[in-house]
């Protein structure tokens, strides 16, 4: 497939003939075809040929680019008339996160399949992520965006945007797809990110460095989240740049407080972990980076053990137990009667334990276009979204038994989006179905 034809596929919609072809070629007996077709559908629906990235909101629907915040709104740090410098609801708020995890998964899948279509998609997304790194005048800042105009973005970024971006560039640097020119760009970009973080004492700040970002806590904090953010960033900078400074700094910070950070990164004590959230899978990619490249085998094995323990907990625990899973992500600030009624319509109750497997079994793709916001929240955030978190963790954990356990549900997720995804207009679920499908393809092919 040449570049012109590839871009044409990306820009195409869900035409009837294309849908029939997808159903013919993408069958449960050939999950590789399913996954590749879903990648095409994702780029066709959510991607921009101008910026070569995918967005949080569908772009080939009735609203087109109108599904996103307008450039003049973005310039005023507004979304729907409200001040939101971090861009929540704009549709461009998670470009580095969602495309970064997409590229990471594409590289994993390509490395074992050597599929040329996956290679072209990975190169396309990498080109888009290069734009992300150059749109801001502040060296080392990873913005929220840009808009398909190629220049508008929100200046209040976050840990997830930066870390997913770092991880994606590092992962691409290890792929057979990377060129010498790509490696130079990656090394320069990751060095700028690390130097900016170091100048700010590892506190993630807004673009002009005037204050801490909305989700910009210090990466030096003595928590698992701080440790995985800091140590993965330093590991990526060390490996891609070859600069001994990052290796020495990583060893020094890792040794602080009697090696507390490494203890946190190998702790198998679930009772001390914070409740999982709809977004906690992002930390697993950081852990995967550390486990894959740490030069100390004992430390790498400790991180792998942590990942397996956390993945098991995510798969086994009762999602309605607030000590295990945060309820805010799908129910809002409180359990309203409307949410409880929506649960009942799926045969669920917070009084009855349910694992992520139980929840996904209740997911109803026919409700993707429902107008009932409470039913929508339960169906999409709880029944599909929360399981993606646990399944993502299992696929990255390296635990063969857990991977086998989630393989069939992941294939069903991919099929659900293939068959009903045209009704999905915005959110993380389409992106995650693609990512999970690619990771499943990688581990099953291997």
Image (spheres, grey):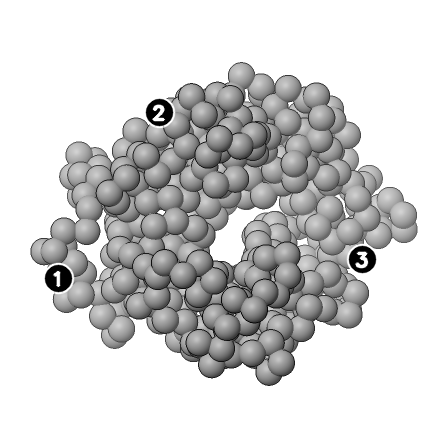
The residue labelled by disc 1 is 20
349 relative to 430 in the view: left or right: right
What residue is shown at x 67% (from left), y 29% (from top)? 205
| Circles 2 and 3 in contact, beta carbons < 8 Å | no
The residue labelled by disc 3 is 263
Q: Which mark is nearer the camera, 1 or 3? A: 1
Q: Earlier in the sequence, mark 2 or mark 1?
A: 1
Alpha carbon of mark 2 to alpha carbon of mark 3: how far? 45 Å
Alpha carbon of mark 1 to alpha carbon of mark 3: how far? 53 Å
What residue is shown at x 70% (from left), y 42% (from top)? 230
Secondary structure beneath dot 1 equals: helix
Q: Nearer the viewer, residue 120 or 39?
A: 39
In this rendering, the answer to whether 264 lies above or below 320 is: above
Seen as rendered, the residue at the extreme right is 258
Looking at the rendering, in which quadrant would you find the C terminus? bottom left
221 relative to 101 in the view: left or right: right
Tell me the quarter of the picture where residue 191 sits.
Answer: top right
Does the image show residue 169? no
Q: Earlier in the sequence, mark 2 or mark 3?
A: 2
Looking at the rendering, in which quadrant would you find the N terminus? top left
What residue is shown at x 19% (from left), y 46% (from top)? 13
Checking the image for residue 149, the label placed there is 2
Q: Which mark is nearer the camera, 2 or 3? A: 2
Tell me the quarter of the picture where residue 416 sits.
Answer: bottom left
Q: Nearer the viewer, residue 345 or 86?
A: 345
Seen as rendered, the residue at the extreme left is 17
| Circles 2 and 1 in contact, beta carbons < 8 Å | no
In this rendering, the answer to whether 162 lies above or below 199 is: below
| Number of marks | 3
Mark 3 residue crowding within 10 angstroms, few (<14) / some (14–19) / many (20+): some
Secondary structure beneath dot 2 equals: loop
* Rendering coords of residue 56 (x, y %): 41, 44
């Amino acid at each position: 497939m040449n570049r012109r034809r590839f871009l044409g596929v990306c820009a195409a919609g869900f035409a009837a003939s294309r849908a029939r072809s997808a159903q013919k070629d993408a069958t449960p007996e050939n999950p590789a075809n399913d996954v590749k077709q879903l990648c095409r559908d994702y780029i066709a629906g959510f991607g921009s040929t101008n910026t070569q990235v995918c967005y949080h909101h569908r772009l080939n629907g009735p609203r087109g680019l109108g599904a996103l915040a307008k450039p003049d709104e973005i310039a005023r740090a507004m979304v729907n008339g409200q001040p939101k410098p971090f861009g929540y609801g704009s549709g461009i708020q998670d470009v580095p996160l969602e495309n970064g995890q997409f590229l990471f998964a594409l590289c994993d899948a390509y490395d074992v399949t050597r599929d040329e279509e996956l290679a072209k998609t990975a190169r396309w997304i990498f080109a888009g992520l290069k734009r992300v790194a150059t749109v801001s005048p502040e060296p080392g800042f990873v913005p929220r965006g840009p808009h398909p105009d190629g220049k508008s973005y929100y200046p209040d970024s976050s840990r997830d945007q930066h870390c997913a971006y770092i991880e994606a560039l590092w992962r691409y640097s290890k792929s057979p797809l990377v060129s010498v020119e790509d490696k130079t760009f990656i090394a320069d970009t990751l060095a700028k990110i690390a130097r900016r973080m170091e100048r700010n004492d590892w506190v993630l700040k807004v673009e002009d460095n005037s204050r801490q970002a909305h989700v910009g806590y210090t990466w030096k904090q003595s928590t698992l989240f701080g440790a995985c953010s800091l140590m993965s960033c330093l590991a990526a900078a060390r490996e891609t740049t070859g600069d001994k400074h990052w290796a020495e700094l990583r060893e020094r910070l890792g040794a602080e407080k009697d090696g507390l950070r490494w203890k946190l990164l190998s702790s198998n004590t679930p009772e001390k972990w914070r409740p999982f959230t709809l977004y906690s899978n992002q930390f697993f990619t950081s852990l995967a980076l550390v486990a894959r490249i740490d030069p100390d085998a004992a430390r790498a094995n400790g991180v792998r053990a942590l990942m397996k323990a956390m993945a098991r907990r995510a798969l086994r625990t009762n999602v309605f137990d607030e000590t295990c899973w945060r309820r805010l992500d799908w129910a809002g600030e409180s359990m309203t009667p409307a949410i409880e009624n929506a649960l009942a319509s799926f045969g669920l109750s917070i009084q009855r334990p349910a694992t992520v497997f139980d929840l996904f079994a209740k997911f109803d793709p026919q409700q993707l276009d429902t107008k009932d916001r409470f039913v929508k929240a339960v169906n999409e955030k709880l029944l599909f979204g929360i399981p993606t978190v646990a399944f993502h963790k299992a696929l990255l954990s390296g635990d063969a038994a857990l991977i086998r356990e989630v393989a069939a549900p992941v294939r069903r997720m991919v099929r659900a989006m293939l068959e009903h995804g045209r009704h999905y207009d915005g959110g993380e679920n389409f992106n995650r179905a693609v990512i999970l499908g690619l990771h499943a393809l990688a581990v099953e092919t291997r």
